[in-house]
Image: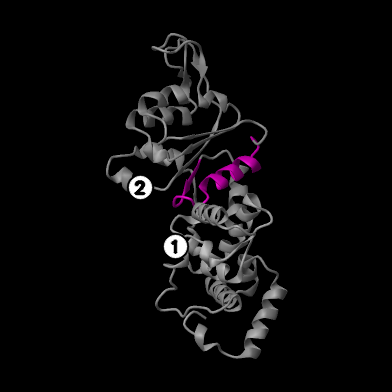
Amino acid sequence: MRALMGRAQRIAQTSASVLIIGETGSGKEHVARAVHHYSLRCHAPWVDINCGAVPEHLLESELFGHEKGAFSGAVGLKKGLVELAQGGTLFLDEVAELDPKMQVKLLRVLDGTPYYRVGGISKVTPDVRVVAATNRNLEEMVEEGRFRSDLYHRLNQVCIQVPPLRERREDILALAELFLGQLSPSARLTEDAKVCLLRYAWPGNAREIKNALTTALVDCEADEIDVAYLPARISGSAEAPREAPIPENLSDLERIGIMEALKKANGNQSRAAMMLGISPRTLYRKLKTYREEGPNEKLSLVS
């Protein structure tokens, strides 16, 4: 994730449209906000819309605005989100949900073509950077004729793929501590609860972690969250992969994380340390300890 955010920072310095792809709850909007934050447009507006949450017959007015009297209920001029984002960033979440008519109109905006508000007679010239996000396979939708090829390529000038939480398990406890700090600064997780969180697959990604901790805090009368207060699917159904032994403590889990990082880094200790968020000296010290302890039979399948 550090490498991903570093790339997002570099992308932010360009004017390219950005397509962010990832599973629900994986943090696509946070990446999009980082692109805006590090861009030359950071002092201009950030405007976002969930394309799947607005009815089709209202979406055109939401994006492009309308003039007074354009339709029943249009009692005054309304600027659209594209206009409100002038000079800044327009974030289109769930962009795959756009209907074909809106796909055509959005393509024209991306090309910088002036447009009319609904019922308008004077054109508005857009000046926005578009960042879009989706959890759908747009390439597949293009092949099936459900998403315009030209719009896909215009949105996808640069693509950022946000990995699911199960592929970055070292982030689980960090996210849990972050959310606990937001929800209840005095609360803490027991060691058993931490192990339980690390075993679970988190199909709902970071959002599921926050929801699980919210539930636990509602049910927990003290500041210490134990396994019993976690949702049943996490405390009772979270099983380690069959081919791997179940770690008995956090030390074993830490060792698994370090070995997995070294595998991903092809044995490069400096790169592995960066992935783990620790210094190369700390990693070297831990590896030296593992060598002195000798092979761990319980972890042989993963290390």
Residue 25 in percent (x, y) is at 48, 50
- The reply, left or right, for residue 247 in relation to residue 281 is left
Residue 239 in percent (x, y) is at 43, 71
- The reply, left or right, for residue 295 in relation to residue 188 is left
**Label 2 neighbourhood size at 10 Å, few (<14), some (14-19), many (20+)?**
some
- The quadrant of the picture occupied by the N terminus is bottom right
Q: Residue at the location (63% across, 88% down)?
A: 291
Separation of residues labelled 2 and 1 (CA atoms): 37 Å
Q: Residue at the location (46% across, 26% down)?
A: 63
Mark 2 or 1, which is nearer the eye? 1
The residue tagged 2 is 139
Q: Nearer the viewer, residue 19 or 154?
A: 19
Work out whether 202 lies above or below 76.
below
The residue tagged 1 is 232
Q: Residue at the location (50% across, 27% down)?
A: 112
| For marks 2 and 1 on the same chain, the one whose residue lies earlier in the sequence | 2
- Magenta residues? 18-41
Q: Nearer the viewer, residue 240 or 184?
A: 184
